[in-house]
Amino acid sequence: MKNNELAISLADVMELMLDAVCVVDRNGSFVFVSAAFENMFGYAPCEVIGTPMVNMVYPEDREKTLVVAESVVAGEVLPRFENRWVRKDGKVVNVLWSARWSEEHQVRIAVAHDISERKEMEAQLLYAAGHDDLTSLPNRTLLLDRLQSSLMLAKREKAVLSVLFIDIDGFKDINDGYGHAVGDLLLQQIATRLVACVRKSDTVGRLGGDEFLIILNKINNTESAALVAEKIRMALSEEFIVKGSSLSVAASIGIACYPENGKEPLDLVQSADHAMYQAKNNGGDKVILATS
């Protein structure tokens, strides 16, 4: 096969490729992009040739991208590299790159594969693994993970951290009397009220059933935690309207604080749980501070 025939064949291959091929000079500017580049990023070749490649990289990924680019120029053999680029329409694209340096032509040759769909699926799976299906609140696994992180921060900054263990009084009667569908809708409304009672820096999660856990980060003192718990108790005592029915519940709330009531996640949760049961055994609709 003659050289000109080979060049034609390679051009045909470039046209058929779903992945985008880019050629970038030593200064980081585009000197060639394949047809798939426009499909992937929205820019026609004439719009990018001669412009810096890094301009298309998502701002937070530019520094690490430049580090990798320099490594490729230095001749280092690198595994595939992931970063984010911004399309012409503003949409962010997750890209998996393969790249090499051509010493002969003094250019970087790179192939881009769009992995946005895979990344979105991974994010959905990760979210599902850490969140409750019904309320979309963090589940037990994610709650304990966040509590561990919050405790590390509290220990480092010598701050107070509080855990509120909340059990809904009267929920079983509503579930039995109105059915589980109404009970589920009620739990969703309860979750919404709980989130509205705390700061964005705090965490509200569902342990399961009608039990919820709240992590209050950097709380001033035990009295402050008690005020938040009382605010929650009052909020949950107001009627709920579910499918046209007026429903009333109450809350038994136990409070445990770091470091007085525990220095590890499970210790704090257990202390708050015991305090909650004290509140429930004393008739419910109460806030009790842990004593150990």
Image: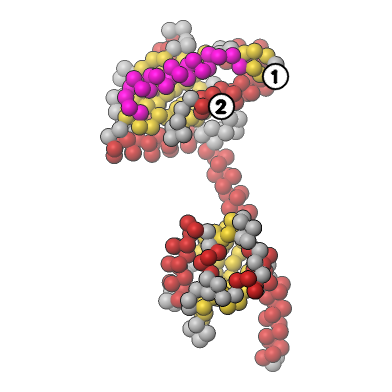
Q: Is residue 280 above or below residue 22?
A: above
Range shown magenta: 219-240
Secondary element under disc 2, as helix, strand or loop, is helix
Residue 290 position, x and y percent, is 35, 18
Task: Give the residue drawn at x 60%, y 75%.
Answer: 49
Can residue 211 be seen by looking at this rendering? Answer: yes
Q: Are marks 1 and 2 in contact (CB under 8 Å)?
A: no
User: To which quarter of the image does residue 273 belong?
Assistant: top left
Residue, disc 1: 243
Task: Give the residue drawn at x 55%, y 41%.
Answer: 127
Disc 1 to disc 2, how far (Cα)?
Answer: 17 Å
Q: Is residue 64 above or below residue 260?
A: below
Is residue 88 inside the magenta stretch?
Answer: no
User: To which quarter of the image does residue 159 belong?
Assistant: top left
Secondary element under disc 1, as helix, strand or loop, is loop
What type is the residue that disc 1 sits on? Lys
The mark found on residue 192 in the picture is 2
Residue 78 position, x and y percent, is 47, 69
Residue 189 position, x and y percent, is 59, 23
Residue 157 position, x and y percent, is 29, 37
State the colouring used for the structure image: secondary structure
State how many labels appear.
2
Mark 1: few/some/many CA within 10 Å (<14, 14-19, 20+)? few
Most frequent secondary structure within the magenta stretch: helix
Task: Give the residue drawn at x 60%, y 30%.
Answer: 134
Is residue 233 inside the magenta stretch?
Answer: yes
Can residue 253 be seen by looking at this rendering? Answer: no
